[in-house]
Image (spheres, rainbow, N blue to C red):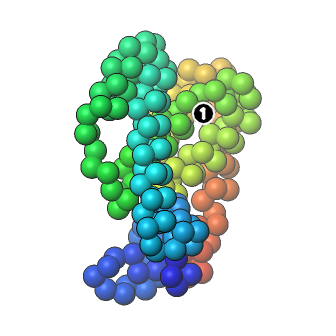
Amino acid sequence: AQTGQFANPFTAAATGPTAHVAPLYPWFLAGLMKLFGLGAGLLLAVELSILVVFALHAALLPAVSGLLFGVRLPGICAGAAAAVLPLFRISSNDNSVPLAVGLMLFLLATERAVKELGALRGGVVSGCLGGLLLLLNPQALIVVLIWASRLALFQVSGRRERTGFACALLLGLVLTCTPWTVRAYRTLGSL
């Protein structure tokens, strides 16, 4: 936010341009810094955004439970527990809870996209959403691939449709991640 560069992610020393840190969460925080400055307004905006993410986390658990297990009750219990127990330390330095919310939204949205849009368009939507998750945390690729396999097996019928879904998903992933990949290549000189 201060320099206009995606660089120096660690406070210990100036390390220069980086691709070590996934860009989505730092961009979000930098956007808040640009909007609110570095004073009390920023602190309030960060804390409010964290509270919204925690609320979404608790609110999405019943729907995800219904999707994964066919019953919402475990998610209702988990959501209630998350709403009243201090399960996570509120901190803007960690993107684990935003990642968890992103993963839950990914599961719900991609299931619906494939059902309503079909294999090809649902695959592109799933790939784009998966790409956003990768820009939040590249380790999400594991969940994206496992979930995409589940969608292909249980929501898409026929070998040709599954192949189309896989290609569409890959296209969405590539399209979403290409700007960051190009930036990293141009800035750092390699992939």
| Relative horizontal placement of residue 161, taking residue 59 as reference (left or right) | right
SS class, disc 1:
helix
Residue 59: x and y in percent read 46, 30
Q: Which of 155 and 62 is in front in this view?
A: 62
| Relative horizontal placement of residue 140, taking residue 113 as reference (left or right) | left
Q: Residue at x 41, y 32 (%)?
A: 58
Question: What residue would you read off at disc 1?
Answer: 110
| Relative horizontal placement of residue 161, taking residue 154 as reference (left or right) | right
Residue 144: x and y in percent read 49, 41
**Is residue 172 at all visible to an observer of this figure?**
yes
Residue 14: x and y in percent read 36, 87
Q: Which of 30 and 6 is in front in this view?
A: 30
Residue 112: x and y in percent read 63, 27
Is disc 1 surrounded by few (<14), some (14 to 19) or many (20+) residues within 10 Å?
many
Q: Is residue 42 above or below residue 61?
A: below
Q: In this view, does 9 lie above or below 57?
A: below
Q: Residue at x 33, y 56 (%)?
A: 91
Three-letter amino acid code of the residue under disc 1: Thr
Q: Which of 28 and 6 is in front in this view?
A: 28
**Is residue 143 at all visible to an observer of this figure?**
no
Residue 184, image quadrant? bottom right
Q: Is residue 153 above or below residue 37?
A: above
Residue 54, image quadrant? top left
